[in-house]
Image: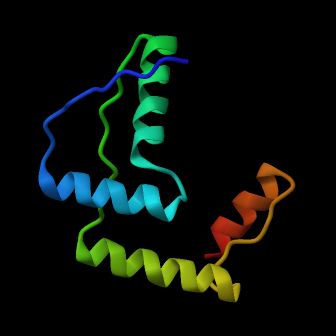
Amino acid sequence: MQKAVINIKSDVALKRDASAVAAGLGLPLGTIINNYLRQLVRERRVIFEEGLTPNKRTAKRLIAIERDIANGKNLSPVFNTITEMDAHLDSL
């Protein structure tokens, strides 16, 4: 397979961070970029998305929820019928 060189301009911090993530995955950054290019050709679409970042209050609450789940606390029981669920909710 012949190779072509692609020169792109990127933010210095972005390249540094992307290279670190790629290295953490055990892959060269070029391999990841090539994968994205193959996906572009195959699917003929580009997806831009940014992960959701909770605010401090929500993040703190999510941590507490995960702790409760790990400890089996504050969990509702499993219901086999709607009647069981209604009875439980009525008892609260």
Return the x and y of residue 51 as percentages of the image width and height.
Answer: 34, 50
Q: Quadrant of residue 49?
A: top left
Residue 18 higher or lower than 68, as above or below: above
Query: 82 left or right of 62?
Result: right
Residue 22 higher or lower than 31, as above or below: below
Q: Quadrant of residue 62?
A: bottom left
Query: 18 left or right of 36?
Result: left
Query: 32 left or right of 5?
Result: right
Residue 32 higher or lower than 64, as above or below: above
**Colour logic:** rainbow
Residue depicted at x 66% and y 83%? 70
The image quadrant where one finds the C terminus is bottom right
Residue depicted at x 69% and y 72%? 76
Return the x and y of residue 18 as percentages of the image width and height.
Answer: 32, 54
Q: How many marks?
A: 0
Query: Foreground: 20 or 2?
Result: 2
Return the x and y of residue 91 as percentages of the image width and height.
Answer: 67, 74
Query: 7 left or right of 26?
Result: left
Q: Residue furthest right?
A: 80
The image quadrant where one finds the N terminus is top right
Residue depicted at x 44% and y 30%? 34
Q: Residue furthest front?
A: 2
Query: Foreground: 42 or 28?
Result: 28
Return the x and y of residue 63 as percentages of the image width and height.
Answer: 45, 80
Query: Foreground: 80 or 62?
Result: 62
